[in-house]
Every structure is written in C-alpha cells, then in structure tokens.
Image (cartoon, helix red, strand yellow):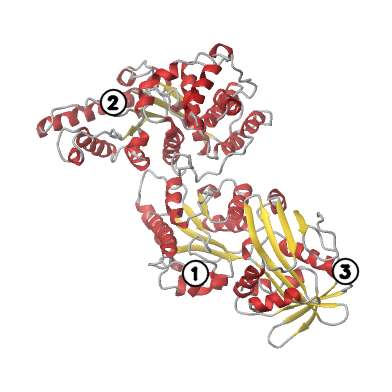
Amino acid sequence: MDVAEIYRTLTDIFHDVFGDDSISVLPDLTANDVDEWDSLTHIRLILTVEKAFNVKFSASEISKPKKVEDLVELIHSKAH
Amino acid sequence: MSPDLFRDLTWLPQPPPDFSVHCRRLLDSTPPYGARLRALASHALNENQLNRLAKLMATARESRSDLKPLMPLRLGVVSNATVDFIVPSLVATAMRHGIALECVTAEYDQVLQNALSPHSTINRAQPDAVLVAIDYRALPLRCALGGIKEVENTVRQALGYIETVRAGLKAHSKTVCILQTIAPPAERLFGSFDRILPGTLRNIIDRVNFGIAESVCGTEDLVLDVAGLAETVGLANWHSPAEWNLAKLPFSNSYLPLYAEHVARLLSAWRGRSRRVLILDLDNTVWGGVIGDDGLEGIQCAQGDPTGEAFLTTQRLALELRERGIVLTVSSKNNDEVARLPFRKHPEMLLKEEHIAVFQANWNDKATNIRAIAHELSLGLDSMVFLDDNPVERNLVRQLLPEVAVPELPGDPALYARTLAAAGYFESIVFSDEDVKRARYYQDNARRVGLQKDAGDIDAYLASLQMEITFQPFDEAGRARIAQLINKSNQYNLTTKRYTEAEVASAERDPTCFTLQIRLSDIFGDNGMISVVICRPRALAEWQIDTWLMSCRVLGRRVEQMVLREVVDHAKRRGIRWLIGTYRPTDRNKLVEDHYAKLRFSHIGQDADGTTTWSLDASSATIETAFMVVRSIGFPKATDSHDA
C-alpha cells in the first residue's frame, strides 16, 4: 500500500473518529492540533486504524507516534 | 474482513454513504428530532458512527430540543472497567429502540462505593435502572483447586458481592438492577477437565452464572446475558488482552455495537416495547421457489434436500416463536388459493393454515397489506416484524412504514432463521400465561382481510429504485433463458404457450415476427431477464400478441406499461396499426385477467372457454412513461438507444 493511499484512508478515519470532516490529515498534524484528540480518543483512533488496515499494533507501538507522519510510517511498515 | 452477522449487525441495513452529511443536516431541520434520529440509528453503524450520533443527541439536549417520540430513560452504569467507550454507543443504539437514553456513569472501578453511598454519583442521579457492568476481573474468584468446600465458599462470596451492590443500589435509588452474567476467559488451565474440576475459573464461573440467574428470578431485576453473547461470538474474539491492557476495555471494541444493541433491546423489552407479530412472505422465504410457477412438486421444503431443509429451519423457528406467543401472519403476492396450497397439501410443510392468524395473499403492495394485518389484530405497526427475501419489498415497507422492523436477509436461506433470531426483535423479559393463550386465541382461521386505502406514495419509492429497463430482440445469447421463461412462467402469462428452444430460434429468425427479451436492473442489482413478448403478423397492419409473460418478482413496478410503450413504438415504425391481445385463462394466471383492460385495450371478443380478445390502436395510443431509464439495443433500422 503506498503512502498516498494511507493518507487518503486516514483522512476518512480522522473524520469518522473525531466527528469533524474539516480536519486536514497532513504529516505534521499532532494531538495538540485537534481539540478532541485526548488519550481515550487516541485509543479509538488506533483501534479504527487497526480495523481499516487489517493490522495489529503492540502496546509499545501505540504510544510511539507523535505526529501523523509517524503513524503513517508505522502503518506502512505493517500493511501490505 | 467480510461482514459478520453478529459483529456487524448485518440484519440492519447499511447506513447511507453520506451518513455524516445526514447527521450534520439533522439539527438544521425543524423539531421534533426523535423520529429522524431513530431512522439514522436504525442502520448497521460502527462505533465511530454511533459516537457521532450520540454527539448529535447531546447537542439536541443542550438546546432543549424536542426529542419526541423517543421515550426518556435514565440509566446508571457502574463497572470495574472503562465505560467511556460504552456510553456513547449505548445512547445512540437506544435511539434505534425508541429510547432517549441519558447515562450516568460511576467513576472507574468504584462499583461498591457507588452502590453503598447514598451520596454517590449514581444514587444522587436516581436512575430508572442501573447496569452493573462487571466482568470476571471484578470478582474474587481465585481459590485452591479441587476443594469443593472452598469452591462453594468462593462462589458464595462472589454472589455476595453482587448482592451487596444490588441491595445498595436498590436501597438508595429504588432502581431496577441489570446484572450481567460473567463471560469466562478463553484461556484454560487443564483443557476440557476445567469444566469438571472444582476450583478452575471455568468451573467457578459456571456456578456463579447459575447463581446470578437464580437470584433475579421472581424479582423486578434483569439479567443481561453477556456470557451468552460472548459464547455466540467466541470467547477468544470477545476478550482482547491487548485492549484490556491498553485501556481496560472489558471486551474487544469491535463488539461494542453488538453489546449496546443487547442492552438497548433489554431496556426496550423492559419498557414493554417487544414486538409481537411476525409477517412472513412465502415464495423463497418460507419455501424455496415460486408456488405459482413451480407448483406443489416444484417448491423446496423437504427433508433430505439442503435447500429444502434451510426453509424448514425458518418454518421451525416461526413455530417456536408462535409457541411463545408471537402471532404469525402471511403477506404474499399470490392468488389466495395458490398460496394456501402448500399449507394444505404439501406433506413436509411444518407450517399449517391453523398457525396463521391473518393470511394476505393478493397482488396489492405489501405496505397496504401490513396495515390491514395491524388493523385486524388491533396491534400497532411498531409490534410488527416483516420477513421477506426480496430487497425491493423490504425497502418499500421500510420507507412507507418505518415503524415495522424489516431484517436484511443474507443470500443463503440456510441463514434466514439465524439472522431473524440474531436481530432479537422478540426480546422479552417475561413469559406469561397470556403469551401461552395468545397462540391459541389466534388459532383459527388464517383469515383474509379487506384492504383500506393504500399505505403511501408508491411512485416516489419506484423513482428511488433507479430502474433501468433494457429491450432487445431475441438473440442467441438470450435463447436458453427465453425458452426457460416461456416454459416455466404460469402466473403472469397471458397465453401460456410453450415453445422449445428450436421454436424460439425460428421466431428469432422469422423477419415477420417481432420479439422482445426484457431485462431490468435497479439499485439492488440486476434482476436479469424478467419478461418476454412475441408478436406475429395476423392481417395487414395487425400484430397478434402471441406471448406476453413476466416474472412476478418485478410485479407492481410498471414494467408492463413500459413494455407496451416499446411494442407500440416498434409497431408504428413498421406500419402496424392494430395490436391484438388475448388472455387464455388457466388455473394459474387469474392475475392477468385484467391485464389488457388495465392497459386500456378495447374488449372485442369472448370465447366459450373464457378466452378474451382485446385490441389497441397503436397509431393513437399514448402510454405514460414510468420512472425508469430505457435502453433499446439491437433492433434493425432504429436508433440504438433512447431515454424515457
């Protein structure tokens, strides 16, 4: 799966999880930029990502990504 | 991942692709919002969609909007796990069941404290009911292996803990408690021996669950059978060690929509909103095949044939439901006599006429018939469930009578019964003498009732189907199917003339013969070839309509009107002025007795055997167009396509 495709799918996921269709999912986006991105919503986000890309993350992997770019890299390393 | 019946609630229709747009617009419309919220909630929503809907509800509440006709209900939730994810799913799912749910949650892992203190969050809120959402991790279940005394003691302590919570909540909130049975972990210690050896977790949890069920018997409290739910989806799917470690989620989040659905169902049943009537379609729902075309010997509902057994399973479930007080009725597009035949004469049919309270077999739309059934039984539409294999019928009823529950059905009839059961429409918290009597009360007559006025705007529904009709002359590719339809169609068949494939081929090659094979597709997919017409020259400028037949599956969709339009169009182009139609009665085709009259042909003759003859002046006939795109393909010396 190429990176552009991951960004496209992630955009839909962000809109769904945060209930806000105006979020632009760019590499530098962090939790600070999205009002509702707290620890609970982060988990919801990760679980939705796992389902959508059919991948599983370990507990240590989940806490690592600091911005969208890191998350995309993590997905890219797992999704085929 | 392919859709899973339970995890993905596949008995519910899929949400519209622009679900978020529907959500955004909802609060811009005029209140009350209740019915629209409920309609949105009635789809197979995932957790994120449920969240969005819950937020919508919160916004509506903040602005003190009118939520009618949703029924307000306040639910307390106490748990040893994280309930932050559960609550929005519960709120949104409750709307599906007509409830405006307000949740009050206790602090994380503060079950006992909240139950016992009169000033706790829960007790101060005085909820109508409290969900005691605890799992095996909340209970002191460890003990030495093998010692029966110690095991009994452990079980007593676990039940004692639950009892203390319950008593506290009842003393301070005067509330109804909903206790959960305990889903055992998937991991075993010995293996199968775990069931037998006292002191294993499996063995203890079996005893605790038995104790929980016993303790609510004869009280006003309720049980939510989480253990049963986890068994159904598989313990290894239900429990997610990773999600527990990550956020103390009591079960895998994938099952949140299912869990919420079961809680909401129980609340709805508790508030007396269970459904009571099952309306059955017949052809391809209760038996395989079409009784009017395939006949008594042709339909499938016999042991020894896998398809037949699938339909018998559906019949068996219907009978079991009847025994617990659900009223069975029939709505089928058929002649009454023909539809009753399998009930009377088929040796392997489990359902008999005496099991059916109201029997509506006619050619009217099903929404009108369902209204008549509700009226006859003096029950509301919201107590009805309608089972039909045909997606067009299902959506018609959903659109015109949104109160009626209409499950989606999978392609394989082997799964009809499981799907209907999984949908849980008949969830109930009691089984009374009245339920037993109800079946007997309605046991009599499979009566037929008259129809009141039509249920609603069928035209708007037909337009929404985005039908596309394709006309072609006979050709080699269609020949086998044309011959099959000619030899199989009994009901919508004006002359019931049978032709071999060779005879079909000769009509195809005969330049004086005008032939049509007709296909229809709609938003649900391609229906394939659904109608056949053959016209032969009779006199100068006259066509005899030798064959006109149609599949009953597309009845009531104005197909015949469009077919006539096409025939008239070609007739004019070929200098034909008169169309002569005949209706030859058989014991199966009473349905089309008035076919030509309805299409405004003039009656010009009647034979002793009941055959009637009709004519239409093609040069002056104007035939209205219906809501469909028309394609004409492969006709000589004509434009290849035109749109209506």
Identify the residue shown where x is 53% and y is 36%. Answer: B45
Q: Circle 2 is placed at which residue position?
A: B137
- Ranked by sequence position, the earlier of labels 1 and 2 is 2
Q: Are marks 3 and 2 in contact (CB under 8 Å)?
A: no
What kind of residue is marked 1? Ile
Classed neighbour count for the residue bearing mark 2: other residues with Cα under 10 Å, few (<14), some (14–19), many (≥20): few
Q: Choose mark 1 or mark 3, whichever is in front.
A: 3
Q: Choose mark 3 or mark 2, whichever is in front.
A: 3
What kind of residue is marked 3? Lys
Identify the residue shown where x is 54% and y is 15%. Answer: A67
From this view, report whether residue B212 is shown above or below residue B137: below
Give B206 or B69, whichever is nearer the viewer: B206
**What chain does mark 3 sit on?**
B
Mark 1–mark 2 Cα distance, whole angstroms, equals 53 Å
Q: Circle 3 is placed at which residue position?
A: B572
From this view, report whether residue B541 is shown above or below residue B121: below
Residue B512: percent from left, percent from top: 81, 77
Q: Circle 1 is placed at which residue position?
A: B299
Q: Quadrant of residue B220?
A: top left
Per the image, label 2 sits on a secondary structure element best described as: helix
The answer to whether residue B124 of the structure is visible from this angle is no
- Ranked by sequence position, the earlier of labels 1 and 3 is 1
On the same chain, marks 1 and 3? The answer is yes
Residue at the extreme top of the image, as rendered = A32
- Ranked by sequence position, the earlier of labels 3 and 2 is 2
Classed neighbour count for the residue bearing mark 3: other residues with Cα under 10 Å, few (<14), some (14–19), many (≥20): some
